[in-house]
């Protein structure tokens, strides 16, 4: 159940970043950082969803600044 809650939160953050809602980006990145800091990872593969979110965020910033 706890894992589902984390996945729901992750999905919400990812959706917000992909939609690039600038007013919520800072809040979402803070939530993502807290989630990462509070999660006990046992393998690199568990980090992949977070890496994708950050990569999408960085790509969105590059497009915005172009």
Image (spheres, rainbow, N blue to C red):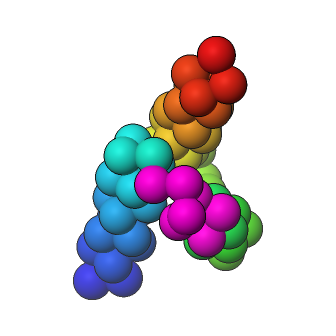
In this view of the protein, which residue sits in the foreground, 31 or 39? 31
Secondary structure predominantly adopted by residues drawn in magenta? helix
In this view of the protein, which residue sits in the foreground, 7 or 19? 19
Q: Residue furthest top?
A: 66
Name which residue lies at 65% across and 63% down. 26
Q: Is residue 37 left or right of residue 15?
A: right
Is residue 1 in view?
yes
Q: Above or below — where is 41 with respect to 1?
A: above
x, y (%) of residue 12? 35, 64
Q: Residue furthest bottom?
A: 1
Asked where in the image residue 59 lies, by quadrant, the reply is top right
Q: Is residue 22 left or right of residue 16?
A: right
x, y (%) of residue 46? 50, 46
The magenta stretch spans residue 25: yes
Name which residue lies at 59% across and 29% down. 64
In this view of the protein, which residue sits in the foreground, 32 or 3? 32
Asked where in the image residue 62 lies, by quadrant, the reply is top right
Asked where in the image residue 63 lies, by quadrant, the reply is top right
The magenta stretch spans residue 64: no
Q: Above or below — where is 58 with respect to 32?
A: above
Q: Above or below — where is 59 with respect to 54?
A: above
Total marks placed: 0
For the N terminus, the image quarter is bottom left
Q: Above or below — where is 54 with respect to 34?
A: above
What segment carries the magenta color? 21-27
Q: Is residue 32 left or right of residue 48?
A: right
Name which residue lies at 61% across and 70% down. 27
x, y (%) of residue 32? 59, 63
Is residue 45 in view?
no
């Amino acid at each position: 159940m706890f894992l589902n809650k984390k996945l729901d939160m992750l999905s919400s953050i990812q959706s917000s970043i992909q939609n690039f809602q600038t007013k919520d980006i800072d809040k979402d990145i803070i939530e993502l950082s807290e989630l990462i800091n509070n999660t006990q990872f046992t393998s690199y593969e568990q980090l992949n969803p977070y890496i994708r979110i950050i990569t999408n965020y960085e790509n969105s910033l590059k497009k915005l600044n172009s």
